Image: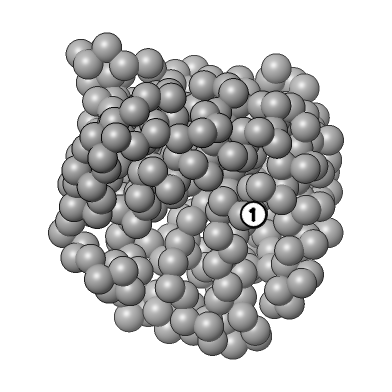
Amino acid sequence: MKIGTSLRFFFPAGPQTLEIYQSLVAASPPDAFIERPMGDDDQVVQASNLVEVARAAKSAGLWALLVGDNHSAPPTYGRMFQPIPTISRLSAETGDLAIGVVLLAPFYHPLLLAEQIGTLSCFVDAPLIVTLAAGGNRLAFNAFGYTLASRGRRTEELVPPLRALLAGETITAEGRSFALRDATISPAPRHPTEIWMAGTNDITVERAGRLGDGWLTAQNAHDSVLADQLELYRATAARHERPILPVLRRDVHVAETDAEARAHIDPILAEGYRGVGYDELLVGSPSTVIERLRHYESMGFDHAMVRHITGDHRAMMRSFELLGDVVTALS
């Protein structure tokens, strides 16, 4: 199994962030997903820590590094580091790791995005991954002047022109958010760019099989749901003659022992964390995390993207070191 990491990109604005998060969760439906900002609340420290995390991912021998996306956070609540400039800076630390972004597709213009990816490739002699998600944050859609109901169509409209532009083609195309006339990009990426689709329900999993080069799962899906979705994804990709690359998403914390790992994570779960419990997390000693990942490998996942649960930078750095042992065992 190949193991990569997706990085925390949403950070607290101050000590009030946790209370605001807990209030939002309390007022939301039980199945709602609300991102919890974690980590230091100083933006300079946040940026510096991200650079250290990229170095740690490289040292651990990980396969890939992704940075995610969100928009329009209230400034009293959190700070969202945007993915293109963030991954551009971090690429100076990652060497030959595959790098990429997880983008909320409805908010991107295909020509501008393709130009940014093409430029990034000039600085990085490594594969690039663009993962597209439809999103679900009503505040973000309101900020862009879009309706939440348009997210599926906007996401699907982005894929064909983006793929063609990244392949060096000259295209004419229209969508809800763009109109292209004889558009092309220069430079084009020097390595083929993979376009993955993030899928959390049957509609988006089917979209991944139909349009994507890979499928990135939900981070909080139960194993039984993952098994059903994997079957749907494989069947859809085969029917549409698309590549089949299922990529497991799980949040992680590795410590010397299971007890130490749980002692660190228990308070975080008690405060509220992404609507998940230990069944959907990778928490424990290296041997425990290896065992869990081998279980997912037996299900049909031979690629995984993990993101650290903790906001404690020192604990995260130690977890990355131990994750290197996991990588070695599973490679």
Find residue 70 and report its image quarter: bottom left
Say which of 202 and 68 sits in front.
Answer: 68
Whether residue 93 is visible here, answered yes or no, is yes
Task: Residue 87 in the image: state x and y as whole percent.
Answer: 64, 48
Instruction: Specify how the rendered protein is coloured.
Output: one colour
Image coords of residue 210 (percent x, y): 24, 25
Q: Residues within 10 Å of mark 1 (few under 14, many from 20)?
A: some
- Of residue 140 and residue 201, the one placed in the foreground of this image is 140
- Classify the position of the C terminus by image quarter: top right
Judge left or right: residue 301 versus residue 237.
right
Q: Which residue is mark 1?
A: 86
Determine if residue 316 is in view.
no
User: Is 123 or 327 nearer to us in this picture?
Assistant: 123
Q: Quadrant of the N terminus?
A: top right
Q: Quadrant of residue 244?
A: top left
- On the picture, is 59 further left or further right than 189? right
Question: What secondary structure is marked by label 1?
Answer: helix
Q: Amino acid at mark 1?
A: Thr
Give the x, y percent position of residue 294.
58, 22
* Horizontal side, residue 211 vs residue 264: left or right: left
Who's the residue at 44% across and 45% down the image?
113
- In this rendering, the answer to whether 153 lies above or below 165 is below
Q: Residue at x 47, y 81 (%)?
A: 74
Q: Residue at x 56, y 51 (%)?
A: 84
Q: Residue 181 vs residue 309: left or right?
A: left
Tell me which residue sits at (53%, 39%) in the image.
117
Farthest residue to the front: give it: 182
Q: Position of residue 307 (x, y in %)?
A: 61, 47
Indicate whether 183 appears above or below 270: above
Q: How many marks?
A: 1
